[in-house]
Amino acid sequence: MLGWELPPHNSGGLGVACLNMAHALSRQHVDIDFVVPYESDNEEYDFMNVLSATHLDPIYRYGGGSYASLQLEEKVIPTKEDDHFISIRDVQHSYCEFVNKYLMDFKPAAVHAHDWLTYEAAILAKKNYGIPFVAHVHATEYDRAGMHNGNPLIHEIEYEGLMMADEIIAVSEATKRIIHEKYHIPLSKITVIYNSLDESYYTKKYQYNNDAYNYVSSLKRDGWTIVSTVGRFTIQKGLSFLMDAAAMVIQKNPKVLFVFAGDGEERNDLIALAARLGIAKNVIFTGFVRGRKLRDIYTISDIFVMSSISEPFGLTALEAAHHGDALILTKQSGVSEVIWSALKYDFWDERKLADEILAIANSPALQDTLTSNVKKEYNKISWDKVAKKCLNVYNKTIKHKRN
Amino acid sequence: MRAICLYLHMHQPIRYREYSIFDVSNKSDYFKDKYDGRQSNERIFRKVTEKSYRPMLALLEHNIKLLPDFRFSLSITGTWLEQAEKWAPELIEQIARMVKTGQVEIVGETYYHSLAFFYNREEFDAQVKLHADSIKRLFGVTPVTFRNTELAYNDELAKWADEHGYKAILAEGWDKVLGWRSPNYVYRPTDTKNIKLLLKNYRLSDDIAFRFSNRSWKEWPLTVPKYQRWIDDDCLRGPLINLFMDFETFGEHQWEDTGIFAFMNEFISSWLSEYDNKFVTTSEAADLTVPVDEISMPQTVTWADTERDLSAWLSNAMQETAMKEIYALRERVLASKNDKLISEWRYMTTSDHPYSMCTKYWNDGDVHAYFSAYASPYESFMYYMNVLRDIEYRLNTTKK
C-alpha cells in the first residue's frame, strides 16, 4: 500500500482512512507493507509493516515549501548532492526510488496507491515489474480547486495514473463521475467504495468536557439551538451560502447559534460577512480544532451542516452523526449518497437550507427521528465491509493479469 | 356456485407543496405546486387518468355492457372526486352511467381518506357523511357497505358500522387472525347484530396487484388459465373469492405493457363462461351465505406491508406529532365557520401525508420512497408542519 501519511502525522482525513482500511484488510488476512515518505518512531503497528522511503522528518513530507528560510534548509533539511531546494517533487522522486529498490526483492500481489502523490511509484511498479495497480481516489485536483482547473502538473500525474491503473476505487459516485468526465476513464474500471467512521471513535474513551464551551452550554439551557460546521474555510466548502442562510434563520428565530469551526483563507471574509448581515452575535468562530475539542463541538451541537459545493466524501458528517447531531447535507457531497436520514439541499439554495434549519430547531420530533435513524445507518457501513470490497477489486486485477 | 367479489379502490390525495416557513403568514397556496412540480396535483391526476383511469374504466364499461352478469364494486374518495370534477369530469359521468345499470356498487368510506376513526370520532362521522352526500349527489345512490381507509379495521369499527346500518364491512383476510379459517366465507364481527364481514383473499389479490409484472416471480408470466386454476383450487376452501385492490393497479402500478389490461379483459369473460360462476358486488356477497363464524380483531389490522398494521402511518415521532397537531386544531377550525379553511384543514387529514413521513423502510429505498411525492420523509414532515402553522396563523387573524 502506497500512502503519504498515517496518524499522528496526518493533516486530514486521508491518513485516518488509510489506517482504518489497512487495519480492516489485515483482519481479512492481507499482508500489508505500507510505504510512507518520511521516518518516524511513532508508526508502529502490529498488523502491518510501515516502511520509510526517506530519512526525512514527517513535517517535510510535502517538501520544504516556500515557508522554509534558506538558513533552516541548510541546517535541517538533508539536501541531495546537487544541493538544490527540496520540493515535493524531490520527495516523490526519492519515494519512487525506494519503491523501485523494494520491488527488486519483494513482489506483492497488488499495489494499492492513495491519491496523486503516490501514483508515479505505482506506475513504476506496474511498468517494471508487472504488478497490478489499484488507484484509490480520495480527491482530485478539481475538488481541491473548487471545480476549477488547479495545478496542471498534478492533473498530468493524476491522468497518467488513472490511465495506467488496472482498477480505480472512488470514494463516492460524485468522484466516480469526475474521474469519468474529466479524466475520460471508462466507468467499468471504477468501483465506488464509501469510507466509514474512524474506529477510534468507538474504541477511545471520550467524555464531553463542558469547560471548553461553557458559554454555548448556557445558551443551550436557555432554549437555543446550536448549528455547527467543521472544515477548511475555502471556497470549496460553500460557507458564504451557509452564512446567508443563517441570516434568514435568525430573522425568524433569534435563538439559533452558528458555530464555524476551522480556519482557512475565507475566514476574514466570513467574519466580515456575518457583521454585514448583522448577525455577528449569533456566529462563533472557534479557529482550528481537532481531537477532543472537535468532539466537544459535535457533542454540543444540535445540527451539523455540510455546505460543500463539492465534497468527495465528507467524513465529518458521520463524526457529527456519531455525536448525536441531526445532519443537513448538500446534494453535492459524497456522504449524501449513502446517508438517507438527513435533510438535503443544493449548495446554492440558501432558502431551503434556512427552511431546514428552522424546521429542526422548531421540532423536537424531527430532530429525534433524524438523529436516531442516522445512527442505524452509519453503523451499517463498516471498515470490514470496505476491506471486503477492496479485496474484490484486488481479485479483479489479478484476474486481468492472468488473462 | 362460486362467486368473485371484485372491489377496486380509487383515490388521489391532495398533496401539499414544498411549503416554506418563509411562506407562512404570507401566502396560503399549499395545494398549488407549479404544473411540472413534484407535488403538482393536476399533473399527477392527468397522468394517472391517461395511464389508468381512462383505459380501465373503458374496459370495465365494455364488459358491463357485454356481460349482464359482470359486477364489481368501487370506493371513490372525495379528494379523487374533487380533482376529477376539475380535470376529467367525463370519468364521473362514465362511472354514473355504470352505477345506473345496477351492476356497479359504490362502497362508503371517509371523504378525505383519513385515519380520523382513530383520532376523533366526531370528525370521522362528519367525513363519512360528507362522502355519502357526495356519492348521492353525483351517482344517486347511498352506500350500504363500508371500508375504512387502508382497510384499517378493528372490532370497534365493526360495531360502529353495525350501528349505522351497513350491511357489510371490508377487512384484510390476514392469516394471523384467521388461523385455519378461510377468507372465502362470510363472517360476523364480534358483538354485532346484523353486519357481515368480507375478508380480502390477499394471495389471489396480490398475484394481480403486486406480482403480476414481477419477472423474478417463478409464476411469471401469469396467464388467465393458470390464474383460473388457482381460483378453482382456492374455491375448495369456500365459494367466495374477495379480490380487493387499488384501482390504480391497472395501468399505474402495473403498466399497460405488462399485459395487465388484456389479462383482466380475458379473465372476466373466461370466468363467466363456466357454468355456475358469477361476479357479486359487496352487498350481494354479504347475502351469499349465512355467517359461518364470528371473528374478533381487537387490534387494528390493515392491508399494508407485511406487518398489516398501522405502523406505516404511525410509527415515528414525526407521524405522531403531525397527527396530534392536526386534530388538535379541529375545534378552532370548525368554529371559524370558514368553509375554505375547513376543507383545507381536512385535506391535511388524508392518510397519504403521514404515510409519506414513514421511515420504517426508508433506508432501503423501497416502495414507500418510490411512491412518495417528497424527497424524503423528513421533508414531507417539515412542509406539513409549515402548513399547520399557516392554518393556525389564519385562525388567529380571522378571529379579530
Image (spheres, coloured by chain):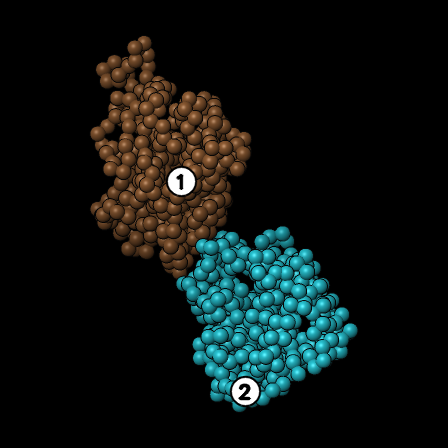
Chain colours: A brown, B cyan
Residue B84 higher or lower than B179, as above or below: above
In the picture, measured across the screen, residue B191 lies left or right of residue B283, that is left
Spot occupied by residue A283 in the image (x, y as percentages of width and height): 35, 43
Task: Identify which residue is drawn at 57% across, 79% down.
Answer: B237
In the picture, measured across the screen, residue B351 lies left or right of residue B101, that is left
User: Which label sits in the foreground, 2 or 1?
Assistant: 1
Residue on which the image places disc 2: B292
Per the rendering, the mark at residue B138 is: none
Crowd tier of the residue under label 1, counting other residues whose Cα lies within 10 Å: few below 14, some 14–19, many 20 or above:
some
A247 or B73: nearer the viewer: B73
The chain that hosts pointer 2 is B
Residue B211 higher or lower than A108, as above or below: below
Q: Are marks 2 and 1 in contact (CB under 8 Å)?
A: no
Task: Identify which residue is drawn at 73% across, 79% down.
Answer: B69
In the picture, measured across the screen, residue A275 lies left or right of residue B149, that is left
User: What amino acid is labelled 2 in the image?
Assistant: Val
| Residue at disc 2, secondary structure | loop
Specify the farthest residue to the bottom: B193
Specify the farthest residue to the front: A402
The chain that hosts pointer 1 is A
B183 or B20: nearer the viewer: B183
User: What amino acid is labelled 1 in the image?
Assistant: Leu
Task: Identify which residue is drawn at 28% across, 55% down.
Answer: A221
CA gap between label 2 and label 1 equals: 62 Å
In the picture, measured across the screen, residue B215 lies left or right of residue A39, that is right
Q: Quadrant of residue B205?
A: bottom right
A45 or B338: nearer the viewer: A45
Per the rendering, the mark at residue A391 is: 1
